[in-house]
Structure formats: C-alpha cells, structure tokens
Amino acid sequence: MRMTTSFTGSRGVRYPAPDVARGFMLLLIAVANVPSWNKMPNGAEPPVSSVDGWWMFVRTLVVDHRAYPLFAMLFGFGLMTMINRRIASGTQTYLTSLPGAPEGREPMPHEAAWAREMATIDAYRLVRRRGWWMLLIGFVHGLVFLGDIIGAYGLVAVLLANLLARKNYSVLYLIAGIISVLALVTYLASGTLSGGDTLTASGEQSVSLTVALLWVVTNALQWAVVLVVQVLIALIVPAAVIGARLADTDLLTHPERHRRLLICVGLGGLALGALAAFHGALTLATTAQLWPWDFAMTEFFGLAGACGWLALLALYAGGPRPDGRLTGLRRLASAVGRRSMTVYLSQTILFGIIFGVVPLLVTGRRLWMGQAAAALVALGVWLVSVVLCAVLERGGHAGPFETLLRTAVARSERRRPTPPPPPAVWPGMQAGPWPMMQMGTHPGAPVPMQPGMSPVAHPGVQPGAPVQPGMPPAPQPGPQPAP
C-alpha cells in the first residue's frame, strides 16, 4: 500500500536527517508544552520544589524557546524541498507535452523557460493551498490549545509562497531581519511575553453549555491574536527562512560531508543559547532576581540553540543509506518525524485527557503535579506516539492528519488552462506582440519586411517564408546556400 500520494512526482532518495530531527524535536515540544497543561484548579502554577526548580533551570537552557524555532526551521526546509521537487517534476511534465517531444525533439530555450515558469507557478500555488488548510487545522486546534503553532506556519506558507518558489532570498532575508529586530525590541521593551496557554474550566466550576460556548468563543478570539503575534514578533519567519535556505544546500541531506562544521554549529549554538538564558534560568532554581532583559536573551538566542539542536541531530541521523533502511532509535525517530502533525496533535489529545478530562470526571478537579514529574508525563506521551508511529510504519500507512491534509490540498486544486509556450523569433520573422507577429497577419502568412531592411539569410530558409508560431521554419525547396 502506498503511504502517500505524491504532489512532486518520484521522491527518489529519502534523506534521514530531517525526519530523525523532527522525531526528536517532538519530544522537546512535548516537554516544552506540558507546563501549559499542568495547572492547579485555580489556574495557578504548582508549588516548585528544589528538584522542580533545577529541572526548570535545565529546561530553560536547552528546551524552552528552542523547540519551536527548530520546528520552524524544519518546516521551512520541508516547504523548499516540496517546491524544488514540484518544479523539477513539473518542468519535465510541461516539456513532454510540447509538440514533437514524444518523437525526441529537443526543447528550444524559450520553451524550457516557459516550462519552468509554469512549474514554478504550480509550486507556489501548492504551497499556498497547503498553507490555507494548515490555517484551518490550526484554528480548530487553537480552540483547545492556544499554544497552537500549525496556524502560524500555515500563515507563513500563504504569505511567503511566491518568494519561496522563486527563491527570492534577498527579500526573504530582509523580511526575516526586520522581524528579528522588531522581536528583539518588543522583548526588551516588555520584559516578558507570555506564551500560549490552555483555557480549561476550573475544577471549582460547573461545566454548563453556556460556559462551554463562552470558552470556545474566547479561545477563538485569543487564537487570532496569538497567531498575529507569532508571525510578526516571534522568530518563526527567520527560522523558516533559514530552513528554506538549508534545503538548497546538502548540509541536511549529506551531513556526513560537513561533520566538522556541524559539530561546531551544534556545540556552539547550544552553548550560546544556554549562556544567553543562564541568568533567567538561574532565577527559577535560586533566589536570584530576574533582570529586565532576561526574557529577551532567552527568546532571541533560542534560535541559536535551535540551530545547535538541528546540527547535532543531523549528525546523529547521518546521510542516506545504500539500502534506504534505518535501524534502532533512528528508525523510530524517523517514523515519528514523518508523521509530525499527527504526533503534535495527538500530544494535545493525550495531555487533555491526562490533565483535564479524566481527573474532572473522577474527582471534579484538574490534575496537577510538580514540573519534574510533568516532564516524565511528557516523555511518556512521546513514547506512546513512538509506538503508534511504529505500528503505522510497519503497516505502510501515513499519519491520519497527514493523509487528511494531503487529501484536502489535492482536492482543492482548481484546474486552470495552461497557456501555450511563446513562439520564438526566427530569421525573416518580425517581432511584435503576442503571438510575436505583426497585427493583421495570420499564422503561416508571409511576414512583410521593414522598409529599407535587407532580408536576413538563414540556411535552407527563404526570407519571408511562412512560419508557424512556436515552430522553427521549414527548409524551402530549391538550391540551398552554401554553409
């Protein structure tokens, strides 16, 4: 059974590093998200023991504000990989549709340019459709979990689809730079920026229909605000641009060729991110007072930590195997990474059941625990997803939400007429408006010459001979000029 229906033709070699990195990244996301669910009945944070404090210290150094930039980089990498493959396969499809192509006629330069342009348009339309559907999925997810990131990635895909498809990196770098500066200024000015949180009914409340409806409406409005903040102030766009640029290199597809560079980026990025977050993390485990710029340092340099994680995970995954097979933990992580949307959404379902649904039904109160214990719950949730993905991998099935997204993207494609390739200007032919013939003439009619101009000679062709648009002139009978 085929796992998925490809939008990009034959997939060829499957490079393990991006999939393995996504698999481990989802463990980091589970650890980073579980505090949003681990709340006391009145919504307050649970008491912090010394063990909890030091765990939060470690989490702030290497996990918080690192997992989501890593997610964004891999998202950008995936988008650009999809674009590259769609353009390559689409160009070939358009070229084979040209007259004479089945008989072996080589395409002319203007035909090759036309085929690539048509394939590029198809690629950015594909990315844009995918982005709209991700926005819808993110909206539904945001009704339950305000920390949703799928909607933000969908909006990024919609806004940047054309720039990515045309590889307009100068504009992409400019946009990423502006957002980075805006984010840093905002963090420094505010001193803090609260992340996504879950809005669930307190154990002290009775859950009536009115309360439930109010909760849904409130979450929908807050999701829209958080969506804009994530795109304009968070570092999602800069991280996605970095990931897209990486897709045009072989740093992730062949990490074995860049071992020294990746080791330096991995260790240096994690060290820089940890150093920037050190004082802010120390306030969680000791009596040290928070500095106004601590949050800005932790958030802004989290991108460096994410680059470090990506480099080390790429090194661990390695390059493509001759037989295409992975073993051990790499195989399990790859299975999770290839179903990242399903795993990400299943984390919300499992966290909601563990911390909300079951405790409210049994005790009438939400479940809460220490932060270190909650991290173990996050690890357990990730392990459950590993087992689920291993079962799906063994059966050759894609994740259900990946299948849903791909089906929606495919069925929402609108059929558009394909314009024919523009005709070339041949000797003896007069350039003009489409179809590059003078107004008043018809295809195949002799082309009048400009007064005062001598005919242009072409071997085997009489000047002014009939020319079909888009086709080379046919040799004329009679004596041929010497070459």
Image (cartoon, grey):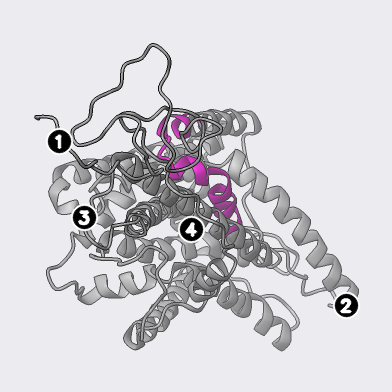
Give the Cα distance between marks 4 and 3. 35 Å
Numbered mark located on residue 315 in the image: 3
Q: Which residues are magenta?
A: 149-174
| Residue at image point 31% right, 16% down | 454
Q: Mark number for residue 50?
A: 4
Between the residue at mark 3 and the residue at mark 2, the CA separation in whole angstroms equals: 52 Å
Between discs 4 and 3, the one toward the N terminus: 4
Task: Characterize the local packing of mark 1: few (<14), some (14-19) or many (20 or more) Cα atoms within 10 angstroms.
Answer: few
Which secondary structure, mark 1? Answer: loop
* Residue where numbered disc 1 is placed: 479
Tell me which amino acid carries mark 2: Leu
Q: Return the residue at label 2.
A: 209
Q: Secondary structure at mark 3?
A: helix
Residue 7: in magenta span: no
Q: Residues within 10 Å of mark 2 (few under 14, many from 20)?
A: few
Q: Earlier in the sequence, mark 1 or mark 2?
A: 2
Query: Which SS does the magenta portion mostly show?
Result: helix
